[in-house]
């Protein structure tokens, strides 16, 4: 079976009121800040079951805003996984803090408390569990690890919005949770981000840093802030997307189930493992290729799938491979994942026959 058109790796989908809400925002005098920003924060906080949600211009500035609110200073250490999208590490560098990288579990591809514990020093300020591809890190153990210590936990939930761990939503178990609404994410505002917390103090600090350090008096800079604001137009999209989160998550679960069934017939492609306590909403279906089944290597497989009009993505580059930036020690698991993981097309409107075609092509490329 061959699909009529090429299959993109990701595709944003609109489900209901996106056009209407954006038109309302355009028709108003508020296209920067405005009522949709307030509504998006309120609705998001309600969905997450937290007291406060603060919008940001993207997922990276959401992390930056969180670090500023926590008082990260030059020389502080921020613990992050060595295999993940490295936004948190880059923010730490921009703040003259030091990212400290952990190994990850070879099955879940996520940070563990045991790995994080090995990295603790008197300079540790923040631990950032990154919930990679929609999985959720072992949050109980990570939170227990910092109990009694002056160390914050900021969950990076860019890839795991609506995923659950022991029936708790990702982003609600640490001190703060940072989200991304980039175009490929579970809900999208094009670009955009959010930080959730139960702390009113942290929320107020983020609001201050987000808007040039001015909060209570116009043009009076209380701190040297940034412009991390989300626009009213983007928030209008977010409100419409969030209204359909039930449908979006159902369709993503369908895509995940279909891949599980089809990839069970491709033994050389091992899916990321999701523990029983995790109920994932998978952002991107990713598999680790067995080099015996695919001696040509992951990158060659990607090129061969591209020739069949199937767009894929490689796994994240391990921090230890980016020595020009991070200079961290070798991490065999992270490095192996970097070289063997391939991410397959994943979006809610992907059809069963397309998934069957993708998996059949992947199997046909085995030695």
Image (cartoon, rainbow, N blue to C red):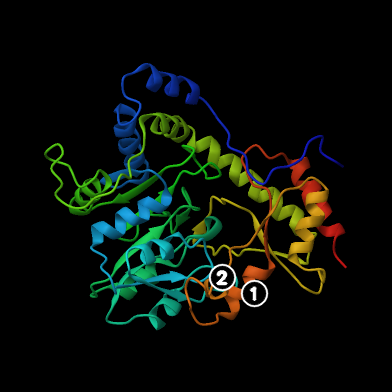
Would you place residue 70 above or below residue 325 in this image?
Answer: above
Residue 227 in the image: state x and y as whole percent.
30, 44
Look at the image and tell me in which quarter the N terminus lies. Answer: top right
Left or right side of 27 for 359? right
Residue pointed to by mark 2: 318
Closest to the camera, between mark 2 and mark 1, is 2
Q: Secondary structure at mark 2?
A: loop
Say which mark, if any, is on residue 106. Answer: none
- Is 197 on the left or on the right of 98, as rendered? left
Q: Residues within 10 Å of mark 1 (few under 14, many from 20)?
A: some
Position in image of residue 35 (x %, y %): 30, 27
Which residue shows up at 56% across the image and 68% down it? 109
Closer to the camera in the image, 111 or 231: 231
Where does label 1 land, which residue? Answer: 336
Quarter of image, res 332? bottom right
Image location (x, y in percent) of residue 136: 48, 61
């Amino acid at each position: 079976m061959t699909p009529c058109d090429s299959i993109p790796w990701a595709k944003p989908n609109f489900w209901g009121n996106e056009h209407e809400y954006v038109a309302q925002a355009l028709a108003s005098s508020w296209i920067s800040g405005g009522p949709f920003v307030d509504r998006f924060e309120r609705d998001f906080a309600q969905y997450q079951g937290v007291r406060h949600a603060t919008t940001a211009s993207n997922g990276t500035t959401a992390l930056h805003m969180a670090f500023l609110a926590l008082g990260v200073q030059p020389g502080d250490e921020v613990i992050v996984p060595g295999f993940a999208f490295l936004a948190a590490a880059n923010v730490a560098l921009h703040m003259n803090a030091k990212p400290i990288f952990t190994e990850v579990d070879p099955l879940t591809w996520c940070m563990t408390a045991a790995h994080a514990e090995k990295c603790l020093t008197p300079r540790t300020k923040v631990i950032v569990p990154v919930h990679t591809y929609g999985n959720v890190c072992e949050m109980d153990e990570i939170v227990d690890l910092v109990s009694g210590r002056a160390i914050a936990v900021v969950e990076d939930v860019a890839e795991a919005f609506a995923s659950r761990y022991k029936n708790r939503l990702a982003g609600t178990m640490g001190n703060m949770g940072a989200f991304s609404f980039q175009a490929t994410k579970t809900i999208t505002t094009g670009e955009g981000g959010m930080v959730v917390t139960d702390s009113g103090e942290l929320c107020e600090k983020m609001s201050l840093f987000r808007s040039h350090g001015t909060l209570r008096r116009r043009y009076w800079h209380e701190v040297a802030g940034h412009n991390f604001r989300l626009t009213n137009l983007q928030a209008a999209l977010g409100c419409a997307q969030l209204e359909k989160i039930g449908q979006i998550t159902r369709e993503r679960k369908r895509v995940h189930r279909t891949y599980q069934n089809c990839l069970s017939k491709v033994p050389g492609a091992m899916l990321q493992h999701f523990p029983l306590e995790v109920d994932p909403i998978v952002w991107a279906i990713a598999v680790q290729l067995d080099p015996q089944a695919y001696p040509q290597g992951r990158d060659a497989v990607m090129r061969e799938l591209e020739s069949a009009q199937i767009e894929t993505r490689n796994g994240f580059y391990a921090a230890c491979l980016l020595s020009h930036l991070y200079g961290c020690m070798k991490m065999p698991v992270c490095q192996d994942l970097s070289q063997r993981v391939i991410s397959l097309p994943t979006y809610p409107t992907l059809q069963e026959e397309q998934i069957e075609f993708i998996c059949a092509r992947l199997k046909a490329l085995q030695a």
